[in-house]
Image: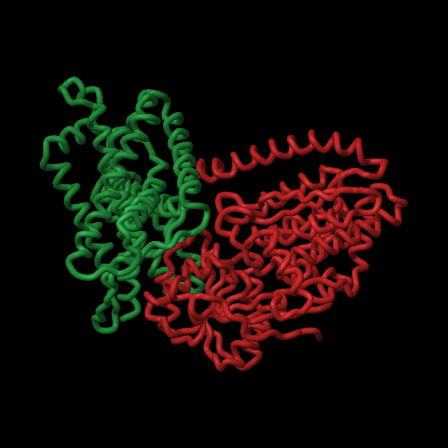
Chain colours: A green, B red
Amino acid sequence: MEIFFQQVVNGLSLGGIYALIALGYTMVYGIIELINFAHGDVYTLGTFFSLAILSAIGVSGEVHGPALIGIVALAVLSAMLLCGVTGVLIERLAYRRLRNAPRLAPLITAIGMSFILENVMQLWRGPSPVPFPQVIPNPSASFGGVVVSAKQVLVVGLAVVMMAALQVFIYNTKLGKAMRATAQDRDAAQLMGININTTIALTFLIGSALAGAAGFVSGVYYGTTWFFNGFEAGLKAFTAAVLGGIGNVAGAMLGGFLIGLVEAVATQYIPGGAQWSNVVVFSVLVLVLIFRPSGLLGESLPEKV
Amino acid sequence: MRFRSIALRLPAAVLTAALAMGCSSTTSTSQSASSATAGGVIKIGIDLPLSGADASTGIPTRNGAVLAVEQANGKGLPGAFKLVAYDLDDAVQGTHDPAQGATNTKTFISDPAVLAMVGPFNSNVAKAEIPLTNDAELVQISPSNTNTGLTVGDAAAKLRTSHPDVNSYFRVCTTDDRQGSAGAQFARKFGFSKAFIVDDNETYGKGLADVFEAQFKALGGTVLGHEHLTKGQQDFKALLTKAQSLGPDLVFYGGTTATGGGLLRKQMADAGMQSVAYMGGDGISDQEFLTTAGDQANGSYFTVAAPETSKLPSAKVFIADYEKRWNSPVGAYSANAYAAASIEIAAIEQAIKADGGKMPARADVLKFVAATANFPSPIGKIGFDRDGDTTAPILSLYKVSGGKAQFVEQINLKS
């Protein structure tokens, strides 16, 4: 049983990273119905940004005491800010002009954007894995044989806090209301005096900032990064968003954690499980979509064409 | 998702097609200059992963082959021919790619000035290339492929599709059955008895891990589990928790650093397995492994399917020349690539002489390579057996300590 709970811990921390990325996918899809394939790469960019900030302030190893909080806050916030700005720029330069174009055009543009980001990162930090400084000391506690490390708490905690904050923002602020209105009916929202461009830019800002936070966390958690990281993580996060119901914030979080859990548990209990975990993940996705085509928490909306 | 995977490959394919076209247009001129008369250009195709995570081993390997070409040009070839090292990268989006290797091989084959080929680095790439070189009877020597099925048995016979009786593929290193069994012998010798095996499910990694498993059991060890990683996987905590629950004293990894070898070792500490030993094949014998695994790299073992060059008197000159030319230390397979290229150059020289100073045919070069015996090289005297395998299978074991790979011992598995 210990092993099962250990796998739950492993799965939740893996799922936390998926969830943070999935939030960005789901927000952008919710508002402009674009699968932003560049999002996974914005996440990788987040690791590189925080890496650059850490090396700029000369941090290369563990930090203790109050300085730790300051450094982590600085790294997370600057990664979030820089990624947010990148997201807004991507929207402004690549997607805005195609907003009323056929669906396929922005989709292809998103794939192109993903290539651009990957190659920029490859030029920037080289094609090989880059070590990420182990800023956070990693004490671990054992609960009846189940080991939980500080980093795992950080990953899950950050994901939950971010999602809660986002939920509050969307449902309790004026800007959030504007976002929901734009998602529901862009033209009607515009007629009601909502600035569509600002609202969509804001969505990209928030979504990409969350990817930036995920980038920092994954750098700390895995200790390495490389330019192509975002591909696999982005794919899983996208799956998480679809599983939870694309366009639904709580669903993205649920989907992320669920995929992480399924992966970890499948690895443990299926013989040769490491190889089959992806198969299990996508089988779960298929099954869920058969019975709930709009995802676990997705609402069935009238067909928009 | 589907769109993306297609789109990923598309630009690479377009690019190589463009490259191939560019090359054929330039070589058509060199061909007319050299087809009949002496004094033309002879190219040695080099296919290795030169970008991405594999580059840290690929580039020093390429440099070894290029050095051999440069030295041969310095000495001069019979018939006043000039050698050109023609290198192509088989990595796509950061990792070696069999389809790209095949495209590169076709590029070499379509260029009549290419008489021999060095490469590839990875066994799965070799599988895609051997049928092509077999068809064209273009000699190919790999500095590093260790998968047994590339040369021996039914698996190898299936690769020789066009000319079943002709072998165009040779290698200067030894094979996985020898590397895996050397690994198992070392592991047992150091007292490990319970192994958990992980591989990356590629031709090389799985082959190595399977042989290790069989041999480790044969030597009285217990194999607690054998798992395969999926491509692009980054989080191995679940897998390692599973491994830890079984209580192994050794984790054996069949695969390369790029396919997860470094991260796996790094995450062992997080899973509470910092005191468990780690062993792999030559796939983790690179700088990348040390960087990725960080402090955790210490205490891991790996075998290399080549003699330790610094222990061989014949390697001293090579190491000095290499360091002088490239201003960087010799890689694990630099000497092998140098030997591979040197064997091909020697065969080309013999073929030029046999053809009376004219541009030799590919089949002639192949014939002389196949007849190689006791060829002096930095990795000892090399000869090829009927299958194209080296007749001097020497393997070395290394242990990482203090962030550096230290030579432990070597064995000669000549049976």
Question: What is the count of numbered marks?
Answer: 0
Which quadrant of the figure contains the C terminus of chain B?
bottom right
Q: Is residue A197 left or right of residue B30?
A: left
Residue B171, x across and y down, in percent: 69, 59
Residue drawn where x is 37% and y is 74% of the image: B275
Q: Is residue A119 left or right of residue B393?
A: left
Q: Residue furthest right?
A: B356
Q: Is residue A100 above or below residue B357?
A: above
- Position of residue B125 in the picture relative to residue B351 (left or right): left
The image shows residue A18 at horizontal and vertical percentages of: 30, 49
Residue A256 appears anywhere in the view: no
Q: Nearer the viewer, residue B72 or B16?
A: B72
Q: Quadrant of the N terminus of chain B?
A: top left
Nearest the camera: A213 or A133? A133
Location of residue B410 by image quarter:
bottom right
Which residue is found at the position 43% from the left and 40% from the top? A123
Among the 4 quarters of the image, the one containing residue B89: top right
Task: Give the x, y percent position of residue A47.
Answer: 32, 47
In the image, taking residue B6 as reference, residue A278 lies left or right, namely left
Q: Which residue is the extreme one toward the top?
A: A191
As rendered, which of A162 and A295 lies closer to the eye?
A: A162
* For residue A64, above or below residue A52: below
At 64% from the left and 31% from the top, the residue drawn is: B22
Residue A127 in view here: yes
Q: Position of residue B256 (x, y in %)?
A: 51, 58
Q: Is residue B130 above or below residue B271?
A: above
- Say if A110 sits above or below B214 in the image: above
